[in-house]
Image: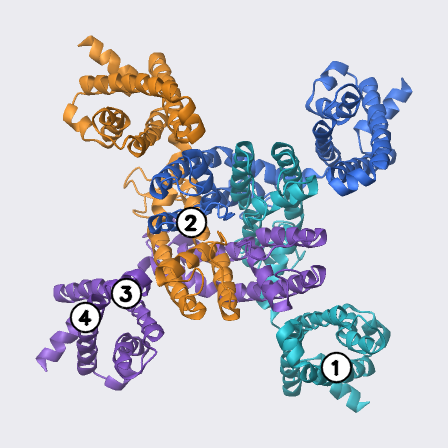
Chain colours: A purple, B cyan, C blue, D orange
Amino acid sequence: MALRQRLHKVIFESDTRAGKRFDVFLLWIILFSVLIVMLDSVAEIGQRYSDIFFVTEWVLTVIFSIEYGLRIWISPRRLKYLFSFWGFIDLLSILPSYLSLVLAGYHYMLVVRIFRLLRVFRILKLARFNTEAQILIEALRASVYKISIFFMAVLAIVTFMGTTIYVVEGGREGFSSIPQSIYWAIVTVTTVGYGDIVPHTVMGKFLSSIAMITGYVFIAVPTGIVTLEISRSALKKKECSACNSKNEIAANYCAQCGRLMG
Amino acid sequence: MALRQRLHKVIFESDTRAGKRFDVFLLWIILFSVLIVMLDSVAEIGQRYSDIFFVTEWVLTVIFSIEYGLRIWISPRRLKYLFSFWGFIDLLSILPSYLSLVLAGYHYMLVVRIFRLLRVFRILKLARFNTEAQILIEALRASVYKISIFFMAVLAIVTFMGTTIYVVEGGREGFSSIPQSIYWAIVTVTTVGYGDIVPHTVMGKFLSSIAMITGYVFIAVPTGIVTLEISRSALKKKECSACNSKNEIAANYCAQCGRLMG
Amino acid sequence: MALRQRLHKVIFESDTRAGKRFDVFLLWIILFSVLIVMLDSVAEIGQRYSDIFFVTEWVLTVIFSIEYGLRIWISPRRLKYLFSFWGFIDLLSILPSYLSLVLAGYHYMLVVRIFRLLRVFRILKLARFNTEAQILIEALRASVYKISIFFMAVLAIVTFMGTTIYVVEGGREGFSSIPQSIYWAIVTVTTVGYGDIVPHTVMGKFLSSIAMITGYVFIAVPTGIVTLEISRSALKKKECSACNSKNEIAANYCAQCGRLMG
Amino acid sequence: MALRQRLHKVIFESDTRAGKRFDVFLLWIILFSVLIVMLDSVAEIGQRYSDIFFVTEWVLTVIFSIEYGLRIWISPRRLKYLFSFWGFIDLLSILPSYLSLVLAGYHYMLVVRIFRLLRVFRILKLARFNTEAQILIEALRASVYKISIFFMAVLAIVTFMGTTIYVVEGGREGFSSIPQSIYWAIVTVTTVGYGDIVPHTVMGKFLSSIAMITGYVFIAVPTGIVTLEISRSALKKKECSACNSKNEIAANYCAQCGRLMG
């Protein structure tokens, strides 16, 4: 029982020295395993060092499996952990390797191991990394509704532009269907501009120009929204109980009346 | 008469349960019909399932026609509805299908049905979706004048850049005329960068670099404008009970009439 | 003398009805003449309608010449007008046509006529168009120093990146020299991304990725600068002489102490 | 000894007239030498004028060597200068030329001379250039932590997107490995859009569209962060004379110690 408690401190918490070391160790192991997945996908490297990758992968899988087993063992509420988000991600980290023993179609399935990367965020979360991240997340959460309205407006604009250019270019090269033309409109409005689909008629070029300038100006909208919310969540004020004026969150005394703040 | 009133509640309003259901039903029908228009334009799909699409389209047209008829019937002021924006959009949703019976040149005309998508916004409008959208729309409306000044400045810059590069590149590949070169300038200044027209001379590349950096910095202008206006319209004001003018949330006295505020 | 004064009102001012009409007339003439210059440059159109363009151009030149003569005649200080910015632009609007009679090398020289477009801005200036434009111009002027620092930083970054990739890609396709590689760096950092020069080595792609993300984040700097300055110049406050608190520029009474403001 | 002090004033300081002249002279020499390095890399120019470039380079190297020698001689703490950042850059400016005498592999090594450009910033620094630059640097420093969080989020997004499209496009043209696909994701999310790697399947295009819109909206985050910090560092604070903490310009009492401010 004492062992379980000590392991809990090491694995799930990060206040102790051992807990921090475990986190850092896991962080590097995860990043290393993600790197392996990536390199394995490069044909020349994957084929030449296939043996090394195979062994490394199994060593990593065993390490992650032990960790997974320990996490289940020391969890006070095992089922809750198993069906939690992180429990699912932990399982996803080892499952593909085991399944590859049973099933064929080896190659692509193993790509799922890339989700191990998500586990990095759990470690960062434990490491009180999020004092500042909280501001950003809060700002994004606060602007989610406005941004989704913006997103819908963009979808509508892109649909109309795509359809219009589909008619204008008359199904020429690239603009072979409405969905394809909408894809072009997205490429254009977001200012990505691959250049794989490009207008050829004068009218098409005129329309593209409008789409580009629209996109160029429209980017101002999410920026404005997020800027506002970041300012809001970063500049959160507390109110003085005496004169009700707003003070910076770090203030000890009210900047207007000089009284000590609660 | 009672039926007309009840139908009015269902079709034009969305406070009642039936009204909400009708809106949601219509929303899906519209999105579905737009999807059909899109898929129909894909050559392989459109040809293989042309029968299914034909039938589906007519079923949808009949549904929309009945809806259109009902809207006319229950409107207190029929002519006003018929010549309103939404009345026009509703007609546009069904007209192409009927016209296709009479006229040839079937294919492209049917694309007009994509305007059905606009009807989605009426439904969202009814659903009190716009508490937050209002802020964005207000911000965009407030910045329309400044942005149109910006827009004119961009047009002038793009015209001069296009003309200059037309001379510099001497009518080479792509830069065959001034309008074409202006198209290039727009592609470049907005940072879209298709790459379909690209400078080949040293001088042309130097000029392009200036155009790119100009565009890269200039995007700051609409962003600054919209950010300002979003902040303004989001950081709401309180109204003076005496003169109805808007005051800053922290004001003690109305800035227009000087009266103490509640 | 009375004629000169009346003409001055019509041509240089825009308060009277005739002055406004003259401005609007000139505005359309200028835009029309710019359109002619553009269309003339399109090979197919320019050749087919060369006669029409030739006549139109001379009609416009005569109109502008008369206007130029009148402006000189009615100017209280003729030399000052002749050597002013607008005097120079006015001359530039008619000179190319006359020079084309004397000189060969007709084609490209006539492109200078595009500078007539600048004259549009004089008309807009007279028309008190600039109440809001002033805010933008002031904001840009206020941020000019900061933006030029940013600009120098971008130039340095782009030079180092270009040089590095020149070494990394080893003079391969596109990266044939340092200036060429700097051009690539500008195309990349500004997120234009033509795709005419593209890295081929792994190291080059890695470096490009850094360049892209740098550019993606760096765009925040001019945006931040301009947003700040637009806010500043738009939200300029006036101070209450009684309590020194800042009030909105349109306020009649101080929002803090309720006193009437100067 | 007096000579050393006078030289110190000229070379290291810029308050005196001679000091300013020396700075300006050095500034032009440096920019000129960087230009030489660039032009030298252009094959046609570098080969034709190789003799001129060779001589010019050695003249410049001698000048920089003398300057380097003088800087060492007049430094009060010679070792400190030698191992300082600027001491290292100064050495890097002359070393490549000398090494080229000894070693082969001439060409690419000489590119290191481009780092001379960094010396420009020392001159600008001395010239009290940084009153405004300080605001930008301070703003960037203040936002470094938030931006690095953003950067990590972008890396994670780009990794997942790259991996997903690698599976979706099934190793087709361009998407040959996960790192390659991540490179594509970076090109897309940053809205650079070279167009060298482009999705070909319907699913791939759908995914790309999501990547583009994500990138289009995500650019709002660093912009919001930097805008906030630039506002903060530009809207300067006044310091409390008692506890030296910074207070808002409008504060009557110090927010940290509660004392009345001057």
Compute the Cα span from label 4 to label 1.
62 Å
Q: Is residue C220 left or right of residue C49?
A: left
Q: In which quarter of the image is the C terminus of chain A?
A: bottom left
Asked where in the image residue C82 lies, by quadrant, the reply is: top right
Compute the Cα span from label 4 to label 2.
36 Å
For the residue marked with disc 4, what is the amino acid?
Val
For the residue marked with disc 2, what is the amino acid?
Met
> Which residue lies under the disc numbered 2?
C212
- Front residue of this view, candidates C90 and B174: B174
Instruction: Name the N-terminal-most of marks 3 and 4.
Output: 3
Report crowding for label 2: few under 14, some 14 to 19, many 20 or more residues within 10 A (C-alpha). Answer: many
Q: In this view, does A30 lie to the left or right of B86?
A: left
Compute the Cα span from label 2 to label 3.
31 Å
Disc 1 versus disc 3: nearer the observer: 3
Compute the Cα span from label 1 to label 3.
58 Å
Say which mark, if any, is on residue B61: 1
- Front residue of this view, candidates D51 and B13: D51
